[in-house]
Amino acid sequence: MSLPLLVSPAQLAEQLDRDPGQIVIIDLSSAENYATKHLPGARHMAPAGLLCGEQPIPNKRPSDAQFSALLASLGITPDSHVVVYDDQMGPQAGRMIWTLHAAGHSACSFLDGHLKAWEDAGFATTAEVPHYEPTEYPASLDTHNLADMEYILTHLNNPEHCILDVRSPAEYRGEKVVNAAKGGHIPGRLTTTGPTP
């Protein structure tokens, strides 16, 4: 199977017609939106499954055991090609792709345009919840793509490094505090590309 990292609705539909057996579609939308409609065969996943949930920083990525249990509960195997989408314009689906890659599972795709693009292309949706069997998938998350505090402080003023802040402008300016002890941003060479207010 050969699906690109960013897959169009037409590409996905063609592959589903040709060989649906290895594709696992994951819907990271709200439970309410999933219950209303989703791609046929899509399995719902709460985005909280991608967080460790432990203080003092509950939004760090999950442990190996947590992610292994999540993959198993979704019926994903090492041979599955995982296709993801959400109802938030991509942050949840993007985090799922990143976490899968950290686990060495590169057979995954991001549905371009999410559910709306699928519908706009004329493809059917459903409210039917699919049946699937849980699996066993021991996962080990690589840490090479993580920058901890020590790394950031060491490279803060290195011209070859740039810290990209993708939060909202209000969070960047410190006017809004979300999942942080205080408002504002990391000083130094920093760029923001967050959405405009």
Image: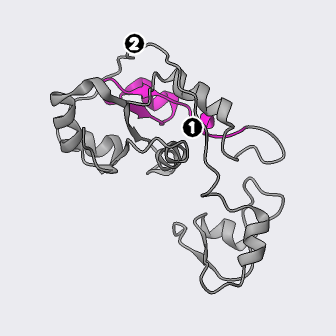
- Locate residue 9 relative to residue 48 in the image: left or right: left
Badge number at residue 81: none
Q: Is residue 159 above or below residue 131?
A: below
Toward the viewer: 92 or 142?
A: 142
Residue bounds of the magenta highlight = 25-52
Q: Is residue 107 visible?
A: yes
Q: Is residue 120 magenta?
A: no
Instruction: Classify mark 2: helix, strand or loop.
Output: loop
3D distance between C-alphas at marks 1 and 2:
20 Å
Toward the viewer: 145 or 42?
A: 145
Amino acid of disc 2:
His
Q: Earlier in the sequence, mark 1 or mark 2?
A: 1
- Locate residue 166 relative to residue 85 in the image: left or right: right
> In the rendered image, which quarter contains the C terminus?
bottom right
* Percent of width and height locating residue 185: 73, 71
* Percent of width and height locating residue 137: 53, 26
Q: Quadrant of residue 171?
A: bottom right
Query: Which residue shows up at 16% across the image and 36% down it?
Result: 14
Toward the viewer: 109 or 36?
A: 109
Instruction: Classify mark 1: helix, strand or loop.
Output: helix
How many marks overall?
A: 2
Q: Is residue 185 visible?
A: no
Tag 2 residue: 131
* Percent of width and height locating residue 97: 47, 46
Amino acid of disc 1:
Pro
- Locate residue 73 relative to residue 115 in the image: left or right: right
* Percent of width and height locating residue 77: 44, 26
Tag 1 residue: 47
> In the rendered image, which quarter contains the N terminus?
top left
Q: Is residue 124 above or below residue 190?
A: above
